Amino acid sequence: MKGLMRKISLCLTVMFLSGAFCFAEYNPLGIPDSCIIRRSIVSSWLTAPFSDLQSRNRELHSDDVGTLFQVRMEEGLDEFLVIVAPQTFNDVDIIDGEKRRTERLEEFRTGSPGSWVVYRDKQTEKALRIVWYFNADSGVYIQFRPAPNATRCYADLIVFGSYAARSVPVGVAFDRLYTASFADVYQWTRRTIPWEKVTVQEGQYRDSVQVAETIKSRLGFIDYAENVSYNENGVLYNIETGKPVDDDELSTASYTDRLTLSGAGFVKWVADGFVYPLAGRGTAISDLVVPTVEYASLSKNGVISQERNLSFTLDWTRNLAAAVLSVRTKKDYTFKTGGTDVCIEPFAADLVNGVLTQTSGYIPDTGYSAKKLKGILYVLASTEPSYMYFAAVRQTSSIVPDEMVFNECAVIIPYFDDLGRFGCYVFEKGRQITLERFIAMYESSFIHLSRVKATENFFPQ
């Protein structure tokens, strides 16, 4: 009897430790889990008739550790939602006359980590999908859809409108998701869902943020001028002519404590912040304009390229990234041998205005559609912490409307803050703009990314 009890005790200990391990490893933010609450409201809320839910008031429930959840129904045009959302707090500034105070307001936000939502059809009342929010960013979530075979369901991992995984079979009945925990979900999908694409690596972004803040601190000392950049010795040159620039040629006044830069010159200035401390000089302009794209001589682009440079900022950013890598490693790399081009294919499809579409992904020597940029950067921040990117923009030419040219560039630094929230610094032409504005500006364009390691050894001149 004692031997049997010891075996039972050992089994329970192993089960407890396994559960604790799962929660600690795969739920690092300690997101609230409503499984205990959902087990008590299956018939009264989750599967209840629509007519019953229309007259039901919102309810508050507490889990076994005292976390409050709100259960409610929200009605859409063709669907209705049953939401189980945890309590969160939001600090709001209140202005009362000349006085300002901060109040903490209680929220039960649908997209907060730990929120669980079932979507049901208003006509048939059948469940359409279950959405589970596990991330600090509500645009990143996992959803499940019922399969014709009642013994399993399908899972989708969505990152800002793009599918990191689509229609992955899960070997459990859809109904089990009504009462399952997040640890259960992870165990069922840990080998089939690419969780690494949405897993925040804490403490890996200090250098990235430090580089970005250093750039920000210098923006007030930068004047913009077309087509100029400092050469390797700090002399201002015209990129196109390869000749020094006289102060009289500039529309802005020149002062010893200010910089005059074009968009390309600005990106070079950032790159030289890594190069100069190691090499004692900056990158050479002549090395940066070396072509990185070969066009067939008789093709349309081949003919045009004989008169105009179609790949200027692509060449510029690729060569800059390779130069930074070469100086850091003390080896000679090109963009091809150094692996600085970003060409990952993390998504299988896109959700555009509620319609599922196939994604084109990375296009060689072109990059990604600007509309997909936020999702791409999120995955890069998750899988390549402490990297930043030189972006080349391919857009319609202002000279010949039916031509596409690389004529703009930017510095992009993605990161996660201490709360696991995604953020992104974007610098273009000596100014900082939001990622959303950058994407809107180039909505119909393509963005090519070249990776550069962000380090604390960053000293822009």
Image (spheres, rainbow, N blue to C red):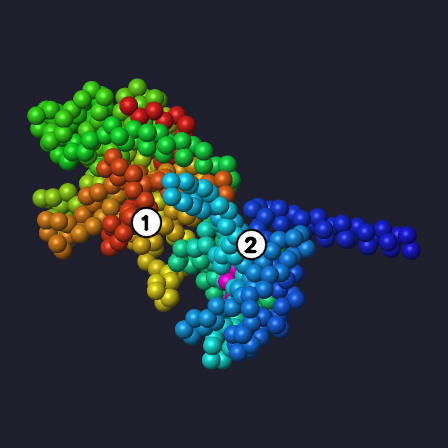
In the rendered image, which residue does mark 1 sit on?
436
The amino acid at mark 2 is: Gln
| Outermost residue to the front | 97
Which of the two residues, 136 or 328, is positioned nearer the viewer here?
136
Relative side of 19 to 256, left or right: right
Q: Which residues are magenta?
A: 129-133
- Residue 421 at x, y percent in the picture: 46, 45
Q: Quadrant of residue 383?
A: top left
- Residue 186 at x, y percent in the picture: 58, 56
Tell me the tag on residue 87: 2
- Residue 285 at x, y percent in the picture: 20, 30
Q: Residue at x 10, y 49 (%)?
A: 399
Crowd class of label 2 (few under 14; some 14 to 19; many from 20; radius 10 Å): some
Which of the two residues, 426 or 264, is positioned nearer the viewer here?
426
> Marks 2 and 1: in contact by CB < 8 Å?
no
Is any part of residue 50 visible from this angle? yes
The amino acid at mark 1 is: Glu
